[in-house]
Image (tube, grey):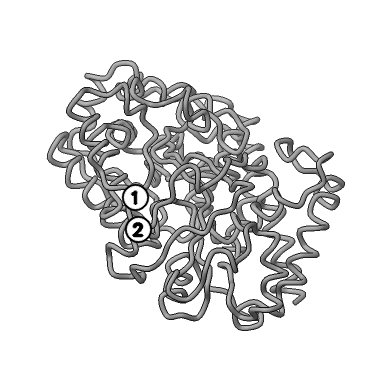
Amino acid sequence: MTVGKAWLSTALFLVGLVTNLNPALAENKAPSVTDWPAIEEAAKGQTVQWNAWGGAENINAYIDWVGDRMEALYGVSVNHVRLSDTAEAVSRVIAEKAAGRIDDGSVDLIWINGENFVAMKERGLLETPGWATALPNWEYVDVEGKPTVVTDFTVATDGLESPWGMAKLTFWHDTARTAAADLPASAKEIAAWLKDNPGRFTYPAPPDFVGSTFLKQLLAETAPKEIDLSQSATDETFATATKPMFALLDEMRPNLWRSGQRHPENYPAMKTLLADGEIDILFAFNPGEASSGIAAGELPETVRPLPFPGGTLGNSHFVAVPFNAANREGALLLANFLISPEAQIRKENPEIWGDPTVLDVASLPEDDRKAFEALPLGVATPSPAETGPVLVEPHGSWQDRLEAEWEKRYLVGG
């Protein structure tokens, strides 16, 4: 995945050259997204290549269900191209644009946010601005109550991507083995706690998004107040902001699971470690993940939230249509279905996924509103009071730098 990110930087430079030489590459002559009947007609028989993270079986099962519904409703097939890193799909789009492949791209829809969205937006690699807000189901999206549906890591989406889920970093522990009062109440307190509890905590190795999110949580808690993390990182601000964070990571490392010499690959691997009693703290970027894990028999029924009163990072996750999508109309139909009440109700069910909705439930038709209200919260899903305030994600430019510096310190140089 690191190789993919290096290729991403090189390819972005090539795209800039190609775009400057031939601005016409950015043009899209397909039917306007405002002409929805034409979109539906053109989409019939298409197979949407949906590039999405494939690391969790409950999410994969949900995407399979979405594909079945798209076939039944619109005659559109969905092929889930399973990714371990979103940069894989972004790199393909970049390479295609650099090669002049402008109307038959291999990627139709990407599950995306953060630095990958910023990279694609800045290079004109996405469908025309405003397509997301032109979707028929956009009327139900809660723009006022959930402002992160129109900003991505502090960057305005400009309708270039459509939100389909909410995320908030959440921590849990197994009450059969530990009491919340004996555990850290913030990410920065983990280093001190580990001195008395060596080996009982770990985090996925970046660039896994859960591992990178832990780094950003620690950064948000420790960066000097004079550093504005909502602004693009520079060499100077990065060095100043991350100094206390890396000091804590250095302090943690020898006391981590496996003495910090190994890290779990992703959240599912970390979940197994908690279930097997090897670690005491679990975290994910979805408040419903543990409830879903309990329902699936993957976690003990005694797992419960570990409150962080100071708050944790929160954002929305999105889907985006590349500028050269070969099955553009099917991708637009799919994006619209993902924000339908039907799809959002199923996704929020903790027995299915437990991913919070982007919709304004109060604005929905009565039957849909009642269906949302009837959903179980989930035994390990925290209430808003338990999750604490939402901390704003740093600007997307911070993540690549964090991942590169972490690798240099703890993989290459460690």
User: Which quadrant of the structure image shows residue 22?
Assistant: top right
Q: Is 21 in front, or is 338?
A: 338
Q: Quadrant of residue 110?
A: top left
Give the answer, above or below, for where 129 lies relative to 382.
above
Q: Which mark is residue 334?
A: none
- Residue that sits furthest to the left in the current view: 72
The residue where tag 2 is placed is 291
Q: Position of residue 343 (x, y in %)?
A: 26, 39
Q: Are marks 1 and 2 in contact (CB under 8 Å)?
A: yes
Q: Quadrant of the C terminus?
A: bottom right
Q: Position of residue 114 (x, y in %)?
A: 57, 43
Which amino acid, by three-letter code, is at mark 2?
Ser
Instruction: Say left or right for 299 vs 261.
Output: left
Which residue is identified by label 1? 354
The image shows residue 407, relative to residue 29, as above or below, that is below
Is any atom of residue 6 visible in this view?
A: no
Q: Residue furthest top?
A: 35
- Res 192 seen here: yes
Name the side, left or right, on which 187 lies relative to 161: right
Q: Residue at x 65, y 80 (%)?
A: 198
Count of marks placed on residues: 2
Q: Which residue sits at x=17%, y=28%? A: 367
x 85%, y 50%: residue: 240
The image position of residue 310, as x and y in percent, is 64, 47
Q: Nearer the viewer, residue 164 or 128?
A: 164
Which tag, 1 or 2, sits closer to the chain's start?
Answer: 2
Q: Nearer the viewer, mark 1 or mark 2?
A: 2
Instruction: Identify the amino acid type marked 1.
Output: Gly
